[in-house]
Amino acid sequence: MASSRFEVDPEDLSLLQTLTRISNVEELEEHISSVQNKANRIHNYPCIGLFVFTKFNIKLAPKYHHVLSLVKSHTDAIFLDVGCCVGNALRKVVADGWPVENTIGIDLYKEFWDIGHEMFKSTPDSFPAGFVGGDIFDDTTLAPSFDPSNKASTISSLESLNLRSLTSLTPLRHRVSAIYVCNVFHLFNVEKQLDLAKRLVSLLMRRSGSVIFGSHGVVPAQRAQTLDPGPTSFHSAKSFASMWTTVFEPGSVEVSWEVKARPRKKLSVLGEWDIISWSVTWI
Ligand SMILES: C[S@@+](CC[C@H](N)C(=O)[O-])C[C@H]1O[C@@H](n2cnc3c(N)ncnc32)[C@H](O)[C@@H]1O
């Protein structure tokens, strides 16, 4: 995988140059390549080999402008990136106006987050986003509590939180306005994807416009029909979207999705795959 080339569009290149303070493109490539080597030693996810960690693809999400509007109407709104890796998506939302102290990432590997500081030439003081290192499925990272009828979502209970002091996501239950989860769902089978969805629902603030969104690989529709639909299988775009309607009370959310690309390369767990871009918005 590490044989892919570092290629970003001009907008992303410009942001990378600003954040890293490296304007010379060759020097930037060397810097990125050294970060990539270190990241690969932590865990060689395809997104590292494919340089996805250098892109700000969150800007392509159909709901991106809606997401940014949430912090304009509520300046204390919280943004969470699940499986944030080096924190590239967080850098982008902060560059686009989300107050950094109201952003937080979670990743299995704290080392990715530390490498993110190295990559973007920042420190926890110069980029004071919150970060929780841990497994999102681990109850110490996020205590389970799934009750779709729980109305304790409560704008009124929103006293301000110091996200940097958090070591667990549990205090954020029903407090997060935007949850981004990109290239993560496809790491798990349908059973675990449902568990993940429920965990994310427990964090979402029940306020009009609050949103969970992202993109990831799914089984193409034609092949999905031939697969055993058992708990250990993977979702098609359609079944992934339907999953969300089962974890919210009826009529409370709008689920949107589109299959936005069909990469020819195979992804080990999925074989041939499509990419779904999706969002679930609290009405
Ligand atoms: C394929 S990478 C995607 C990174 C980034 N979101 C992107 O789109 O470029 C998956 C990320 O999810 C993290 N991850 C995997 N399983 C996780 C878990 N159970 N809990 C928290 N993070 C997890 C990985 O460490 C990795 O950084």
Image: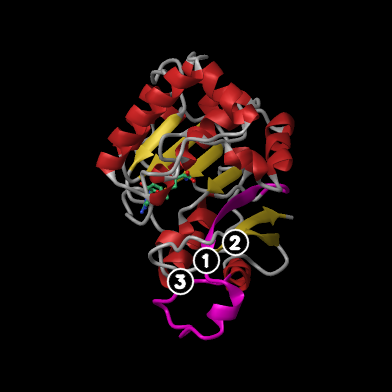
Which of the two residues, 81 or 15, is positioned nearer the viewer here?
Answer: 15
Is 140 situated left or right of 58 in this image? left
The residue to which callout 1 is attached is: 273
Q: Earlier in the sequence, mark 2 or mark 1?
A: 2
Magenta residues (range): 207-236
Q: CA gap, disc 2 to disc 3?
A: 21 Å
Cα distance in 3D space between marks 1 and 3:
15 Å
**Kind of residue at disc 1:** Trp
Q: Position of residue 135 (x, y in %)?
A: 33, 50
Q: Which residue is mark 2?
A: 262
Q: Residues within 10 Å of mark 1 (few under 14, many from 20)?
A: many
Element carrying mark 3: helix
Q: Position of residue 58 (x, y in %)?
A: 60, 41
Residue at 60% x, 51% y: name it.
212
Q: Amino acid at mark 2?
A: Arg
- Residue ID at (41%, 16%): 125
Nearest to the observer: residue 21 or residue 49? 49
- Residue beneath the point at 29% across and 46% down: 43
> Is residue 169 visible to us here?
no
When asked about the image quadrant of residue 150, the answer is bottom right
Q: Amino acid at mark 3?
A: Val
Distance from disc 2 to disc 1, alpha carbons, whole Å, reads: 7 Å
Q: Does residue 212 appear in this view? A: yes
**In this view of the protein, which residue sits in the foreground, 43 or 82?**
43
Question: Residue 151: percent from the left, percent from the top?
Answer: 61, 56
Q: Any magenta on residue 208?
A: yes
Position of 261 compared to 22: left or right? right
- Would you say the residues marked 1 and 3 are in contact, meaning their CB atoms lie under 8 Å apart? no
Numbered badge on residue 190: 3
Lower position in the chain sequence, tag 2 or tag 3? 3
Q: Viewed as shown, does residue 277 lie left or right of 189?
A: right
